[in-house]
Image (cartoon, rainbow, N blue to C red):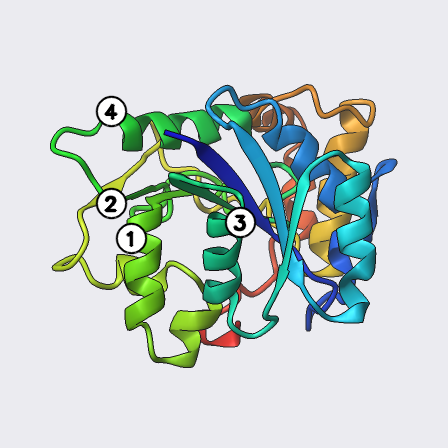
Amino acid sequence: MRNVAIIQARMGAERLPGKVMLEIAGQTMLERVVRRTQRAQTIDSIVVATTANSADDAVADAAGALGVEVTRGSEEDVLDRFRQAAEEHAADTCVRICADSPLIDPEVCDAAVRAYRDARPRVDYASNKLEPTYPLGLDVEVFSREALMQAWNSATEDFQRSHVTVYIYQNPSLFHLLPVKAEADFHSLRWTVDTPEDLEFAAAVFSRFGGSNDFGWRDVLELLEREPDLTSINSGVRPRELSEG
């Protein structure tokens, strides 16, 4: 089974335009996500799925320079863009990662992929989003190409097309779902990047580790225990609603 990490990335973002190409302690956010995903042991290939818009030429060029594959498709119908990426790059299993997650963790990626792979009876979808316990920004979704195609064929609402997997996890009668959980609940921690405050938080974390990507999410937990004031940088950010895209 070929496990393909598909990273959705585009320049258009309402809260923080161009965020995937913004610098975080010496590397763009896209590079952070790619480099950290490359450390996962269960990933066979990485694809950056961006749009066909000229504004996203920079994203495609940057992904190529990082040595990963690129798919370019619809901006609004992200579900179709994922379907295209899965087909073009022969994904048996899709591992969905967002480009606004610079602290994405290879250990968490591997845990989700192995939970999906080892589940008996087999499941269609495994994710730490189902019963969230990991910090926001460590989201990993693992699902079969067959489940993706079923969603692609059946999803009709705009929000179902723009969020890729919402049709799957909102239809447990159609798909076998498996939550992937941490040993404790850390979900109140916000490690995603959607606002300038989030970017400032991420830059502060990476600067504490010398600009390297060679640290894990547990190292960040220890850092926040030592420097709890770091969490105040973006603690007031309102979480984005599903309807906001």
Q: Marks 1 and 4, Cα distance to the nearest angstrom?
A: 17 Å
- Residue appearing at x 15%, y 59% in the figure: 174
The residue to which callout 3 is attached is 88
Element assignment for label 1 = helix
The residue to which callout 2 is attached is 124
Disc number placed over residue 118 in the picture, else none: 4
Q: Residues within 10 Å of mark 4 (few under 14, many from 20)?
A: few
Residue 43, image x and y in percent?
Answer: 50, 28
Q: Is residue 14 above or below residue 125?
A: below
Give whichever of 44, 113 is nearer the camera. 44
Would residue 28 be seen by someone viewing this image from the given angle? no
Q: Residues within 10 Å of mark 1 (few under 14, many from 20)?
A: many
Element assignment for label 2 = loop
Q: Is residue 236 above or below residue 39?
A: below
Q: Marks 3 and 2, Cα distance to the nearest angstrom?
A: 21 Å
Of the two numbered discs 4 and 3 in the rendering, the one whose residue sits closer to the viewer: 3
Identify the image quadrant of residue 179: top left
Identify the image quadrant of residue 54: bottom right
- Residue appearing at x 11%, y 33% in the figure: 121
The residue to which callout 1 is attached is 147
Is tag 3's residue or tag 2's residue first in the polypeptide sequence?
3
Give whichever of 185, 8 is nearer the camera. 8
Q: Are marks 1 and 2 in contact (CB under 8 Å)?
A: yes
Is tag 3's residue or tag 1's residue first in the polypeptide sequence?
3
Amino acid type, label 2: Asp
Would residue 37 be seen by someone viewing this image from the given angle? yes
Q: Are marks 3 and 2 in contact (CB under 8 Å)?
A: no
Amino acid type, label 4: Asp
